[in-house]
Image: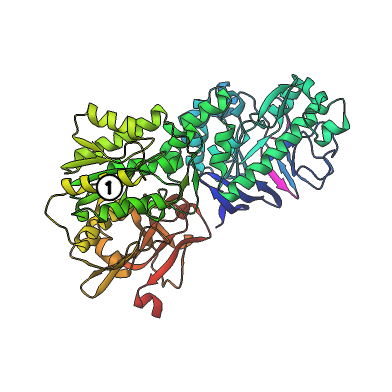
């Protein structure tokens, strides 16, 4: 994938949501993203080989990329941006620029220059950045905006939405080793060491995720080069080394898919925690539309994990897309360490107890778990239900309990269950209390221990009593469940895929046929339905959010971003994608980018094609 305007280009290597490891080229100057511009203080290159980029007041002799941004009055110094070998000349630094009346009229700014200085804040940045095609956008008053975490995330999200992924976003004067991960997660590509340097001058240093009085550096709490040298200005240099180390940790976390887990561990200070809370609750859609539907394993180890974009998307899809199958018995069971659950030892025991009952076809198994709340058996293989891990303490927070019980209320309201069986352990108390409070007639079979022989025997007996005489054929039952997977995957229109079909295979590998034509296949490896061309044809008009409209050319192999005219708003990386050409199905495959990225990228694979139409293949 290649993003950019004119002589400015960004080449992403890996990413997580809005954060990315990439290479930014501004003219002949090159910088790796994310990055910290370290403030030069002596007029010479004193940074050795440790730091990659410098923020200077005037050009100095160095092999590093440097950003020259003199701190002068508005009338002095360079008024435009230029690029040269390893050198980016910035327009003047304008502190608190949004407070200066009429600055947008008085300050010369070229919207297609290598660097554009933004002087607005919040929602007004949309108009401020309209039509900007700079390679680097400087959110000049970031330090002022960052006083309020809500104002900061509003401004960054507005700016990022306006400029897309083709421009790098620079937030000067805000970064320190504690908040760097949050800034990068929010969509900021470049920061500088100004704030961290000022902290050192005020006697504050950062050590392994905490802020301390600088006096601790004499007590052996750090062994960085600055502390080992015992320089007079070691606090300044110590903070810089901490900032550099944090930058490298963030890059590694992005590349390994673990940035969210890493920043949750950093969200302990009031500012960090407040910003992450706003990001998750008030700006969910901003982050979710960049969140992949495959490819990572979620570790839910903090309360913030309940609100991360992938988890909230699951809950929202459960609420908005899921309809329980028409079965008589709802069986509630605990989760397992192994995913998908049906492969675990405990769930195999539950399955044996179900099969031993008089009518297993009427039993619908639903797992109670955190952070997802509830996972019906048909959704066990989808992301993230099959791709998460949690610490097992047996203790549920109020927020975890509320999510599970709210989803249970939805399930009961939409379902036609005549019998509810609770076979639970740690979840038993609050789930049964909730059922009783709601006046739901239920049976508790576990006695607090789900795997003991006597509790499994009770489970078999109660399931038999509640399931009635009417039996459902295996294929009809599986068709109901696959319909729910299709709806969860594509939206309600996806259910049309199962109309008038027959199934072959053995769960979780099932083929879907209509007549002699295969429409798709559920595979245990992907956990969702992979479409054939016939399957795409059957639902393409019903699921426009998962269609990609390509240009009028002969597709050979995979579809690349320059060939994308439109992309369905629901598409995320890892989703099944239907490629359309002039209103007809051309191909099916897996999205390699989100919808926004497909439209933003100048280069790169948009859809990894699995099946091409005959006319396309012959061409």
| Residue 490 shows in the view | no
Q: Would residue 99 be counted in the magenta stretch?
A: no
Chief secondary structure of the magenta portion: loop
Residue 437 location in percent, x, y? 23, 26
Question: Taking 587 as reference, is 71 left or right?
Answer: right
Instruction: Determine the residue positioned at 21% across, 36% down.
Output: 442
User: What SS does tag 1 mark?
Assistant: helix
Is residue 94 in view from this perspective?
A: yes
Q: Residues within 10 Å of mark 1 (few under 14, many from 20)?
A: some
* Farthest-out residue, left: 469
Q: Compared to 459, does 481 lie above or below?
A: below
Above or below for 206 versus 298: above
The answer to whether 96 appears left or right of 397 in the picture is: right
Horizontal side, residue 106 vs residue 599: left or right: right
Q: Nearer the viewer, residue 4 or 279?
A: 279
Residue at horizontal 42%, vertical 46%? 336
- Nearest to the observer: residue 23 or residue 461: 461
Quadrant in the picture for the C terminus: bottom left
* Residue positioned most to the bottom: 618
Q: Position of residue 105 (x, y in %)?
A: 56, 29
Look at the image and name its color scheme.
rainbow
Instruction: Report which residue position mark 1 lands on.
Output: 457
State the image quarter where residue 231 is shown: top right
Q: Quadrant of the N terminus?
A: bottom right
Which quadrant would residue 577 be assigned to in this image?
Answer: bottom left
Is residue 189 shown above or below 579?
above
Tell which of 211 and 23 is nearer to you: 211
Q: Residue furthest front?
A: 454
Q: Position of residue 103 (x, y in %)?
A: 58, 26
Image quadrant in which you'd find residue 182: top right
In the rendered structure, which segment of residues is drawn in magenta? Answer: 75-85
Residue 466 in the image: state x and y as whole percent. 17, 45
């Amino acid at each position: 994938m290649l993003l950019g305007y004119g002589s400015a280009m960004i080449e992403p290597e890996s990413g997580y949501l809005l954060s990315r490891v990439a290479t930014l080229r501004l003219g002949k100057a090159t910088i790796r993203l994310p990055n910290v511009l370290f403030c030069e203080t002596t007029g010479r290159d004193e940074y050795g080989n440790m730091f990659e980029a410098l923020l200077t007041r005037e050009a100095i002799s160095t092999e590093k990329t440097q950003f020259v941004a003199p701190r002068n009055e508005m009338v002095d110094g360079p008024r435009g941006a230029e690029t040269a070998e390893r050198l980016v000349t910035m327009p003047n630094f304008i502190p608190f620029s949004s407070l200066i009346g009429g600055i947008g009229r008085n300050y010369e700014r070229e919207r297609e220059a290598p660097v554009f200085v933004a002087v607005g804040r919040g929602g007004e940045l949309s108009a401020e950045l309209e039509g900007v095609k700079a390679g680097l956008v400087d959110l000049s008053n970031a330090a002022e905006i960052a006083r309020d975490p809500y104002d900061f995330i509003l401004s960054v999200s507005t700016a990022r939405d306006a400029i897309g992924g083709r421009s790098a976003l620079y937030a000067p004067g805000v970064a320190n080793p504690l908040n760097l991960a949050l800034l990068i997660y929010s969509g900021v590509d470049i920061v500088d060491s100004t704030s961290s340097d000022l902290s050192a001058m005020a006697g504050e240093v950062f050590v392994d995720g905490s802020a301390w009085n600088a006096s601790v550096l004499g007590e052996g709490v750090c062994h960085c080069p600055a502390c080992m040298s015992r320089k007079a200005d070691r606090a300044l240099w110590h903070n810089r080394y901490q900032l550099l180390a944090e930058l490298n940790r963030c890059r590694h976390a992005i590349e390994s898919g673990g940035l969210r887990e890493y920043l949750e561990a950093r969200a302990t200070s009031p500012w960090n925690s407040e910003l992450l809370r706003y990001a998750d609750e008030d700006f969910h859609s901003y982050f979710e539309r960049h969140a992949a539907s495959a490819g990572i394993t979620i570790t839910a180890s903090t309360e913030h994990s309940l609100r991360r974009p992938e988890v909230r998307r699951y809950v929202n899809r459960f609420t908005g897309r899921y309809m329980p199958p028409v079965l008589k018995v709802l069986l509630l069971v605990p989760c397992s360490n192994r995913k998908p659950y049906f492969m675990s030892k405990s769930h195999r025991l539950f399955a044996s107890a179900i099969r031993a009952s008089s009518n297993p076809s009427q039993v619908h198994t639903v797992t109670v778990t955190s952070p997802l709340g509830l996972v019906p058996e048909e959704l066990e293989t989808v992301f993230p239900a099959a791709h998460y891990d949690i610490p097992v303490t047996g203790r549920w927070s109020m927020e975890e309990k509320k999510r599970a019980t709210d989803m249970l209320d939805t399930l009961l309201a939409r379902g036609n269950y005549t019998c509810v069986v609770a076979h639970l352990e740690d979840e038993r108390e609050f789930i049964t209390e909730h059922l009783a409070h709601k006046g739901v007639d239920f049976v508790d079979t576990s006695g607090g221990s789900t795997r003991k022989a006597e509790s499994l025997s009770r489970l078999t007996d109660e399931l038999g009593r509640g399931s009635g005489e009417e039996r459902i054929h295996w294929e009809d039952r599986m068709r109901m469940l696959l319909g729910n997977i299709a709806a969860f995957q594509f939206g309600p229109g996806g259910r049309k895929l199962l109309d008038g079909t027959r199934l072959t295979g053995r769960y979780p590998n099932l083929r879907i046929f209509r007549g002699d034509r295969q429409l798709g296949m559920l595979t245990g490896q992907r956990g969702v339905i992979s479409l054939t061309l016939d399957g795409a044809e059957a639902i393409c008009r019903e699921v426009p959010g998962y269609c990609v409209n390509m240009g009028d050319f002969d597709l050979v192999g995979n579809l690349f971003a320059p060939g994308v005219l439109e992309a369905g708003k629901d598409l995320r990386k890892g989703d099944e994608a239907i490629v359309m050409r002039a209103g007809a199905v051309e191909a099916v495959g897996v999205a390699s980018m989100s919808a926004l990225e497909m439209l933003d990228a100048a280069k790169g694979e948009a859809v990894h094609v699995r099946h091409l139409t005959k006319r396309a293949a012959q061409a």
